[in-house]
Structures are given as structure tokens and as C-alpha cells.
Image: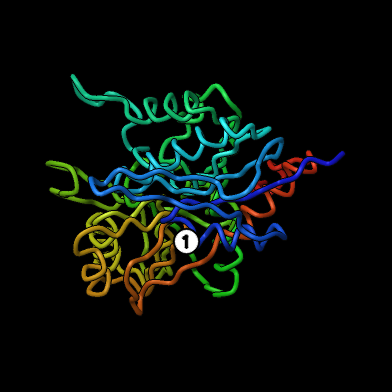
């Protein structure tokens, strides 16, 4: 007898959960959240999930209520006798805290992995982790998806010549190198030095971009400071056009204002995080079809890695 699949979504990821459910070929499951006067809340499933494979869609961007809601959804599903509980976390928050980079700080990524497993999750599906080693923080399977599956088809439609890829920092070298290898071209690196978080003291370019159509690549855009400074440095060094492909659009503070005033032609992002305002320079590409296909393949016990040969 085939096990039934049910897809649910937290409040802030419902917009994406509905599209993922549609891509899979079903409707989003019914659930509700009761809010108490003191700010406490209680999520509950409004349909039977006993013996089913439950997929819970929730990105864990700020505020931390999103993470807490996901933990409570997992716990509720376990107590309601779901057969398996898969957390679909398009954006895995706190991923930048994956190591001790100074004394007396938390490794928050590991802490969150522990919390998810303690709550009862049996599998994780996520996209473009800030650090690949976060997969090792879990003792359950982790399906790590890549936005290249949606970005590459878009890039092909642009038909850009003299293409060069760029990383806004040394940490993204591998990503830029992978895209450059796929498109049989070169990549450059913007070397930055920070005086404090979200504040760049200086930036320099390693490589030649004169007359090139440059694509900046990164996993997260937060305040937009690094991205806009990198675009400025590329322009100063003779780049013809500059675009950016960024997976997770946190876009905090004055990010939209910075981007609109920057040297960027456009900023292309995914819908792992909802954008909270419109901008003529910001284009959103959905990841729903990719997540829906992954759920289908898990159901059919088929390979997922074949989707990411890039």
C-alpha cells in the first residue's frame, strides 16, 4: 500500500509551500496557528497525518519565531504519529555561524541541527548552505540542493558574450569556478577586508574584467554592502555590464536603496525568502518546481544528485 505524502508550510513560507505543493501535484495541507496575548503561539495540523510522509516547508530567516514554529511543527507531527517528518528549509538561518571564529561564541548552526533532530525530524531538504560542512552537523539524511538548477537556464536566455563570473569574496571561489567551468570561461575574485560585521574597510580585484559581461555569484545578500562595493570595483576595472545571481535575498536595512543606486544591471534572486518590496533591478526566480521534483523523487526512491550534475 502506497504511503500518502502531505505538504504543510509555516506562516512565513506559505507563499512558497503552496507553489511546491502545486509542483508536486497536490494541495497544501491544512494547519492553523493560535496566537496568545503574550506572543506565544501554537501550531496544529487540521487533518489526520497518522502514518503519512509529512513535508514541512519553512525557511528560518529572522525573526527566530520562524525557527521555533518549525520545531513545534516537527514535534506536533511526531506526536501525531507521522511516518516520516521531512523539514524543507529553503533558507537555513544561522548558517553563517558554522564555526568558532573567535573565543566564547556559539556554533549556532550545530545548535540548530541538534534542536531539529531533538524535535524529531527524519530528513532535511535545504538549498545552498552557507557552508557545506553544516550537512555533517546532522545525524539524519540531508539533501543539499543548488540554485544553479534555476540560475543556469536563466543565464542561457540572456545570450551574453564575453562572459566572466566573479565572487564578491574569497569564500565564494568554488562557486564562481564551477559556473566558469560550466560556461567554459574565466572567473575573478573581489578580495575584501572587514573592520566589523556588515562593514567593508577595503576591497581589491584579482583578475581582468575589461570589456566583460560579469556575473557576480553569492549565496546570501544581506545589507547589500559587499555586493554593491564589488559591482563598483568591477565597473572601475572596465566591466561592460554587471549582474548578480544571489540565492537567498535577506535584503536587510537599506539594501534595496543601495542596489538601485549601484552599478548592477540587475539582481536575480530566488524565492527561498520572500522579498518585502519591489525594485526594477530585482528579479525573483522560483525554486518551487525544483523542490516539488525532489519530493517526487524521494517518494519514488529515485536519485536526487542527478539533478545537480553541474
Residue 95 image point, x, y percent: 37, 37
Q: Nearer the viewer, residue 19 or 32?
A: 32
In terms of depth relative to the viewer, which is nearer, 84 or 129?
84
User: Quadrant of the rendered structure where residue 260 is?
Assistant: bottom left
> Residue placed at 48% from the left, 53% from the top?
32
Please report the residue visible at 34 percent of the width from the left and 50 percent of the height from the top.
35
Q: Can you tell which quarter of the image residue 184 is in?
A: bottom right
Q: How is the image coloured?
A: rainbow
Tell me where residue 28 sits by quadrant: bottom right
At which x and y percent is residue 61? 35, 48
Is disc 1 surrounded by few (<14), some (14 to 19) or many (20+) residues within 10 Å? many
Question: Tag 1, which secondary structure?
Answer: loop
Q: Residue furthest bottom?
A: 280
How many numbered tags mark residues here?
1
250 lies left or right of 174: left
Asked whether 55 or 308 is in front, the reply is 55
Q: Give the residue displayed 30% in from the left and 47% down from the top.
A: 36
Q: Position of residue 87 (x, y in %)?
A: 54, 40
Direction right: furthest residue: 1
Image quadrant occupied by the N terminus: top right
In percent of width and height, residue 137 lies at: 47, 24
**9 to 96, vertically: above or below:** below
Camera-side residue of 91 and 16: 16
Classify 152 as above or below 177.
below
Q: Is residue 8 left or right of residue 282?
A: right
Pointer 1 residue: 271
Amino acid at each position: 500500500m502506497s504511503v500518502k505524502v502531505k505538504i504543510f508550510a509555516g506562516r512565513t513560507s506559505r507563499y512558497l509551500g503552496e507553489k511546491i505543493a502545486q509542483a508536486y501535484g497536490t494541495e497544501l495541507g491544512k494547519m492553523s496557528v493560535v496566537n496568545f496575548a503574550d506572543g506565544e503561539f501554537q501550531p496544529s495540523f487540521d487533518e489526520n497525518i497518522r502514518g503519512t510522509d509529512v513535508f514541512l516547508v519553512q525557511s528560518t530567516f529572522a525573526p527566530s519565531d520562524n525557527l521555533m514554529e518549525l520545531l513545534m511543527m516537527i514535534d506536533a507531527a511526531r506526536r501525531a504519529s507521522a511516518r516520516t517528518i521531512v523539514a524543507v528549509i529553503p533558507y537555513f538561518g544561522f548558517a553563517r555561524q558554522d564555526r568558532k571564529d573567535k573565543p566564547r561564541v556559539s556554533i549556532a548552526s550545530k545548535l540548530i541541527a541538534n534542536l531539529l533532530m531533538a524535535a524529531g525530524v527524519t530528513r532535511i531538504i535545504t538549498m545552498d548552505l552557507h557552508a557545506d560542512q553544516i550537512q555533517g552537523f546532522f545525524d539524519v539524511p540531508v539533501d543539499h540542493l543548488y540554485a544553479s538548477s534555476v540560475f543556469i537556464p536563466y543565464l542561457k536566455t540572456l545570450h551574453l558574450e564575453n562572459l566572466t563570473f566573479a565572487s564578491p569574496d574569497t569564500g565564494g571561489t568554488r562557486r564562481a569556478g564551477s559556473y566558469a567551468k560550466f560556461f567554459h570561461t574565466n572567473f575573478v575574485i573581489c578580495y575584501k577586508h572587514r573592520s566589523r560585521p556588515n562593514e567593508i574597510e577595503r576591497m581589491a580585484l584579482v583578475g581582468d574584467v575589461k570589456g566583460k559581461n560579469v556575473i557576480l555569484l553569492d549565496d546570501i545578500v544581506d545589507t547589500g554592502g559587499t555586493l554593491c562595493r564589488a559591482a563598483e570595483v568591477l565597473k572601475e576595472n572596465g566591466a561592460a555590464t554587471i549582474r548578480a545571481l544571489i540565492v537567498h535575498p535577506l535584503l536587510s536595512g537599506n539594501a534595496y536603496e543601495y542596489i538601485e543606486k549601484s552599478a548592477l544591471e540587475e539582481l536575480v534572486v530566488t524565492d527561498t525568502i520572500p522579498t518585502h518590496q519591489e525594485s526594477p533591478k530585482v528579479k525573483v526566480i522560483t525554486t518551487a518546481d525544483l523542490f516539488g521534483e525532489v519530493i517526487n523523487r524521494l517518494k519514488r526512491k529515485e536519485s536526487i544528485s542527478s539533478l545537480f550534475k553541474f
